[in-house]
Image (cartoon, rainbow, N blue to C red):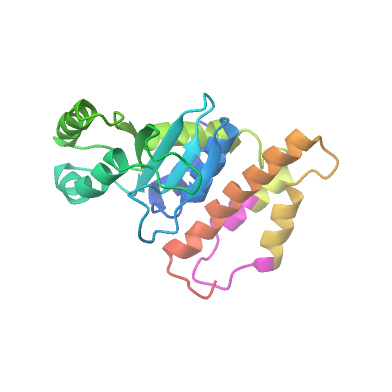
Amino acid sequence: PGVYEKLIEHWLTNVNELGFQIPLCEALLSEGYTILHVSRHGRGEHGKDIIARAPDGGLATFQLKGGDINLGKWQEIRGEVEDLVRLPVMLPGMDPTEPHVPYLVTNGELRGDAPLNMREYAEDWRNKGSGFLQIWQKNELLQKFVAAHGSYIPSKSLTDFRTFVELYVGEFSAIFPRERFCDFVFSLYPLEAKPTERKRALESAILTGEYIVAQYEQAGNAVA
């Protein structure tokens, strides 16, 4: 993989579930999904961090988790995942009886006995009438982010790429370089391009900006 892909992998490995929620929405949009709801992590969301329409029109629901999932971690989150799978989608104007395909998404990997135990529960829930639980792990997420954005920016110019790398590996305990960051993000948006290209560029700018900002979050730099 290229340098940009390796940077995406580094970001994905170190960010938490909140950090990749919006970038995942952008990747789903690039695949033809329609985003219906993004969680604010309050009550009444039934374990569903993202609700979307798949390209085929079916309903899809996503719960995001950060890090590896071993058997102990699975036992901790199983109740939330069961809510994701078995409880209906409750959005205004939607039929709560409409079936949905549930996805558990992690930027880590499944470890030890967790996969077998998870599959047993997924089959039991399916036998009771729910959708079969799908799981996206780190490598699948990485492929989606790279496919959606990795070959688009900031590879269009050496200057943009150099700026991106310098911002990405900066001093994250220091003051956020606001002006330089804004100039960089604006440079990624082609004002004279076709509408479809501008849409793709805007989605990619959001994702690339998140790569940089996440480093300050990881450093606990609340002021930045």
The residue drawn where x is 37% and y is 32% is: 99
The secondary structure that most of the magenta stretch takes on is: loop
Image check: 25 left or right of 140?
Answer: right
Spot occupied by residue 193 in the image (x, y as percentages of width and height): 82, 37
Q: Residue 135 sits in which quadrant?
A: top left
Q: Residue furthest bottom?
A: 223
Spot occupied by residue 130 in the image (x, y as percentages of width and height): 28, 31
Image check: 2 left or right of 68?
Answer: right
Q: Residue furthest right?
A: 192
The number of numbered badges drawn on the structure is 0
Q: Which residues are magenta?
A: 164-178
Spot occupied by residue 37 in the image (x, y as percentages of width and height): 50, 48
Is residue 158 a member of the stretch shown in magenta?
no
| Residue placed most toward the observer, 47 or 169 | 47
Spot occupied by residue 83 in the image (x, y as percentages of width and height): 27, 45
The residue drawn where x is 69% and y is 53% is: 185
Whether residue 133 is visible here, answered yes or no, is yes
Is residue 170 a member of the stretch shown in magenta?
yes
Whether residue 7 is visible here, answered yes or no, is no
When the figure is inspected, residue 123 is found, relative to residue 103, above or below; the finding is above
| Residue placed most toward the observer, 52 or 6 | 52
Q: Residue furthest top?
A: 56
The residue drawn where x is 55% and y is 71% is: 224
